[in-house]
Image (cartoon, rainbow, N blue to C red):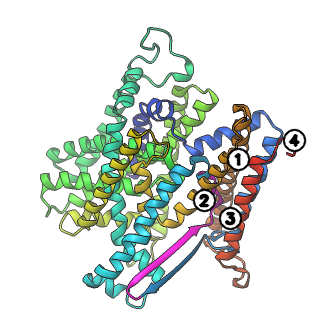
Amino acid sequence: WVLAIAGLGGLLGVLFSVPLRRSLIVDQGLAFPEGKAAAAVLRTGDNPGAGLKILAGAATIGGLMKLSAGSGLRLIPDTAATSAWFGKTIGYFGTNLSPALFGVGYIVGINIGIVMLAGGVIAWNVAIPIYSTYFLALDPVLSADLAGASAGEAAFAIWSTQVRFLGVGAMLIGGVWTLISLRHSLVSGIRSGLHADRNKDGEETPATERDLPMKYILIGVVVFALPLMFLYQAIVDQWMVSIPMTIIMIVAGFLFVSVSAYMAGLVGSSNNPVSGLTIATILFAALVLALLLGRASPIGAVATIMIGAVVCGAACIGGDNLQDLKCGYMLGATPWKQQLMLAIGGVSSALIMAPVLNLLAQAYGIGVPTEAHPNPLLAPQANLMASVAQGIFGGELPWTMIGIGAGIGAAIIVLDEILKKNGSSFRTPVLACAVGIYLPIELSVPIFAGGLIAHLVERHYKPGDAEGEKEAIHQKGTLFAAGLITGEALMGIFIAIPIVVVGSGEVLALPEAYHFGGWLGLIALVGLAVLLYRLAVREEAEA
């Protein structure tokens, strides 16, 4: 069943993402930073020269910083953070030292960086201090667990059990609003898919705009959903439940693939909180199933997780697919050919992933301590999802936090609409803020920093500069950012090889005497920012 869920969920993700291509890539023109970075890499390969030097140099820097960090040599930590107790109040701030996140920030720009950081501030510098001061003492279980804990440990505990659900609430209302906002583009994409070979004027559609025909998409959704329905039936043994489960899966799948793709376009796949989308799916599915089965149902939580598993796979694949399609759009590729290959890639990944997961479960256990595996792999996100499902069926959830998060999301939507009406160039996309609330603040800080450097580079433009000169400046910075992303990603793969072979995450770690604090990583990140700025604004004659 692992193979069925992974493979069929991935295929549904590919199909659901097809009508989103025109809406998010062509009409909305979202950044899709990893897709843009991949296109920059491929273009540089076609036209080697100064661009290739920039790309290779940045990739080397990104790779070396990744090698030096927590999963490699451990010269520097993955994050630099500071925290303290001020009476009952927790103060916390930190930054991830990832060059890839810095590169993503440069590509997505200052607007998204500010909104994401604002979300992080709402969670970590407003909600957590308020909760620790006024509400922690009212939670006897959590306060007992945190007796004697450091400020940093307490901050993460409060965030993981309470405050991150603000982000879930904001994602729920933000996801619905996103679909409402995109309704015209989505309808246009579906209509164009129904007439894939001809446009509305009867002219032949260019190859670069031709998606998989919509009739094949609809047939594929039915064909791939049927096996899942029979799988659900095998679990619950009630057709009156398995059929609604399948319908919920399809509806939630398209909803959250759309949201995942939109967020991948805003902040990149690296920061796409698929676990938050899956939690939102589980909430939606569990509430419907609770009405059908009752909250005391012994199979309710399991049935909910099975829906969430398929939607999670679809959302992961859907967001990544749009990155690939963005890259193809920039390079003039044929979308339907990409979409076909993406479907094959999704199935191929499932064929590898499923046996690997089963092997890990047999060797180490996953999530739940047992007599055979008293220290299993932690799988914290999976445990959180399970607790949400169990919370609906007989347990408790922080509904207050979810409701407040939805209210925050609504307020951000209102603010964005006011800015839009006034013609402001600055906008507040609700999902970018929701991502900032849901993720650790350390991930938002380098994205903001990268966006700030991009803004400073743009301010360097002179009023009389031609568009070509501006594009040249922008291209150099984008190439450098793409190199940082590429170098860190490749080094992460290389580091994983000895870790898997040896079976230890410390196989490359240097002795503790060579472990420097976060200060060294901060110096490296500041140096990286200065280097990127100077490189981008340097005159071509000096390059």
Residue drawn at x 29%, y 47% as measured from the top left:
231
Query: Element type at marker 2?
Result: helix
Other-residue count near label 3 (Cα within 10 Å), few / some / many at <14 / 14–19 / ≥20:
many
- Mark 3 vs mark 2, foreground winner is 2
Q: Nearer the viewer, mark 2 or mark 1?
A: 1
- Which amino acid type is shown beneath numbered disc 2? Ala
Query: Looking at the image, which residue sits at the far bottom?
Result: 148
The local secondary structure at tag 1 comes to loop
Where 119 sits versus 18, above or below? below
Residue 511 higher or lower than 396, as above or below: below
* Camera-nearest label, 4 or 1: 1
Q: Nearer the viewer, residue 278 or 430?
A: 430
Image location (x, y in percent) of residue 140: 26, 85
Residues in magenta, as a range? 87-104
- Tell me the number on the disc at residue 541: 4
- Amino acid beneath label 3: Leu
Above or below, 356 against 13 in this view is below
Secondary structure of the residue carrying numbered label 3 = helix
Identify which amino acid the numbered label 1 is placed on: His
Would you say 418 lies left or right of 105 here? left
Query: Which label's residue is closer to the chain start, 3 or 1?
Result: 1
**Is the Cβ of the residue at disc 4 closer than 8 Å to that at disc 1?**
no
Label placed on residue 449:
2
